[in-house]
Image (tube, rainbow, N blue to C red):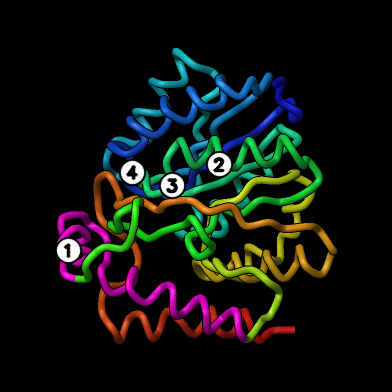
Amino acid sequence: MKSRINSLSVVLPTLNEKYNLEILIPSIIEKLVSQEIEKYEILIVDDGSEDGTQQFIEQYNLIDKNVKLLLRNDQKSLPKSIFHGIENSISEYVMWLDADGSMDANSVKKLIIEVNKDPESVFVGSRFVEGGGYKGQNEEGRMNIFSYIKKISNSEDSILAILLSKYFNKFIGSLLNIGIKDLTSGFIIGKREYFLNKEVFINATYGEYFIYLMKDLNLKNINTVEIPYFCKPRISGYSKTSTNYLSLLKLSVPYIKAALTK
């Protein structure tokens, strides 16, 4: 079936993710081609990496002009990096996701298939709807908690952050009541015009921007659908999420504020 969207910009915000990009970029391109996206670009929005990310993308661009590097010289910021990518994108549709490999190319394909079916809606990759899952879990079923922790420990992810994410999302969801279960997803596809509210991004400190975004889409009556995906352990490098109770408690404050802000 021919793709119903003609152009797509994929935004990857990065900070020292070179080794993950070496795997992720070719695999995403393969899925874009398989879905017959006529025009696409992959925008690497780099926030000052020191692992050779910039040099790698510059070299990649020599063989594939669809892979582009956008440099930020401002204070490091995940939401501002994402918006910088959106602002500089040239496609009718935009997708963004983490660059650590936790959101893999097969999951990218799933979201593209869904937006092809319903181009007017927004689709969110969700760990918390039926069929979705967590980093390190067994995709075929539940994993013994000790096996689960052991598997996560072998990756560079924060065990604490992963175990708490589901319950924190439930709590935030109870404050909002807009029908979205994964309010910290950061994995989404939709029309570029839906994501141009700068206030959603520039006033956020980290992942709470996604709560503001979901509220904004809900306010505009834009249909938003969660699509299950299986969140993998990061391929390489270190998680930028806090790894202790005190830091996570501090980090949670902007999320709660975002949920309560009218």
Pair 2/1: label in front: 1
Residue 11 is labelled as 2
The residue wearing badge 4 is 17
Name the one closer to the observer, 82 or 97. Answer: 97
Q: Is residue 247 above or below residue 236?
A: below
234 sits to left or right of 46: left
Residue 149 among magenta residues: yes
Amino acid type at image mark 1: Ser
Q: CA distance from mark 3 to mark 2?
A: 13 Å
The residue wearing badge 1 is 147
Amino acid type at image mark 4: Glu
Whether tag 2 and tag 1 are in contact, CB under 8 A, the answer is: no
Mark 1: secondary structure: helix
218 sits to left or right of 10: right
Most extreme residue toward the top is 63
Q: CA distance from mark 4 to mark 2?
A: 14 Å
The residue wearing badge 3 is 103
Q: Which residues are magenta?
A: 146-174
Q: Quadrant of residue 1?
A: top right
Amino acid type at image mark 3: Met
Mark 4: secondary structure: loop
Q: Mark 3 vs mark 2: which is more N-terminal?
A: 2
Q: CA distance from mark 4 to mark 3?
A: 14 Å
Q: Residues within 10 Å of mark 3 (few under 14, many from 20)?
A: many
Q: Quarter of the image for the C terminus: give it.
A: bottom right
